[in-house]
Image (cartoon, rainbow, N blue to C red):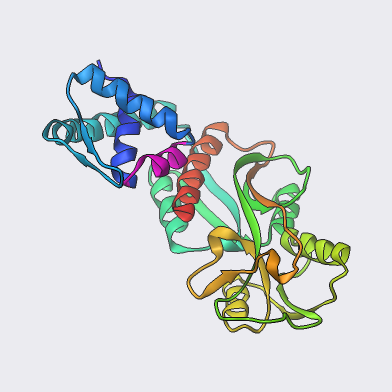
Amino acid sequence: MFDAQLLKTFVAVVDEGGFSRAASRLHLTQSAVSGHLRRLEEQVGKPLLTRTTRSQQLTADGERLMTYARGILALNRDAWAELTRSAYEGDLRIGISEEFADARLLRELQAFAAGYPGMQVKVQVSIPGSLLTLMKQGELDLVVGSLCESSEPGLALWQEPLVWAWAAQPAGILPTPLPLALFPEPCPYREVALSRLAQAGIAQRTAMLCTSYAALQAAALAGFAIAPMARSQVSQGLAELGAEYGLPALPDAVFRLFSAPDADPGVIQAVTQVVIRYGASLRH
């Protein structure tokens, strides 16, 4: 009998095009991924991948097993979903922070809701501080967002560096005072950026107050203002400003899922997996 975890690793290595990306997707070390593949090949008694220093290709036996592996994992997911699904009825009110308001996550949520015929997903987009306030007031069931240096309780999903982003163009000395693009209060990126600049003795001014991530990125892309943002949001045309510009280091942004006390545990678990998959796609 095949171990489902080994099959899952095998599929991830092929889909991600390598061991390091598969390790990141599965939240494993690269050596653990290699060990899984080695054990699977020992079970089969045949090599499944031909490896070079730069790539790996499926062998003929690997191709055959891949077809079965995908089917086995799909049946496993379907069985789990069917047997653990709660009979959820009504609205599921989800608050998501600005950087998550894109088509990929919405498609994931739509596909998730399709498994619950009695569910209607309602999404509200804002900054995490405002969303958490709404949840505490009973107006949201779940909140997905990032915080910096906060003791606010929530399920940690992943974390990534918070960076200073600006137009990807040659720049000499930064303007003084430093022009910033920021969200209004209460925004965790705003608070930590202003705090670190004050500690470093760097003068700043709010050049653009933004109410959307699109506006924040536009300000940085145009070179109009420098914006603190999670590294995964540094899109084409933007660059990180490193220590050579004299800017203070920023802490990691910790992405968390917060749930209301009366939220359905089964639904929380399912939404958590949806958001983790989405977060992995952002970082690859």
Examine the structure image and report whether residue 108 is included in the region drawn in magenta: no
The x and y percentages for residue 266 are 52, 32
Task: Write the residue at 47% across / 50% down.
Answer: 278
- Specify the quadrant of the image occupied by residue 63: top left
Q: Position of residue 136 (x, y in %)?
A: 75, 48
Q: Main secondary structure of the magenta part?
A: helix
Residue 54 vs residue 45, the one in the foreground: 54
31 up-or-down from 275: above or below: above
Q: How many marks?
A: 0
Work out whether 223 lies above or below 238.
Answer: below
User: Image point 67% across, 71% down: which residue?
Assistant: 227
Quick check: 258 left or right of 103? right
When the figure is inspected, residue 103 is found, relative to residue 136, above or below; the finding is below
Q: Could you say where residue 29 lies in the image, as x and y percent from the top left?
A: 48, 33
- Look at the image and tell me whether residue 230 can be seen: yes
Quadrant position of residue 20? top left
Q: Can residue 186 be seen from the camera position used here?
A: no
In this picture, which residue range is highlighted in magenta?
Answer: 17-26
Out of 33 and 122, give the one closest to the viewer: 33
Q: Residue at x 63, y 49 (%)?
A: 143
Picture quadrant where residue 225 is located: bottom right
Q: Residue furthest left?
A: 60
On the image, the x and y values in percent for residue 212 come to: 62, 72
Residue shown at 28% from the left, 34% from the top: 74
Quarter placement of the N terminus:
top left
Residue 23 belongs to the span the image colors magenta: yes
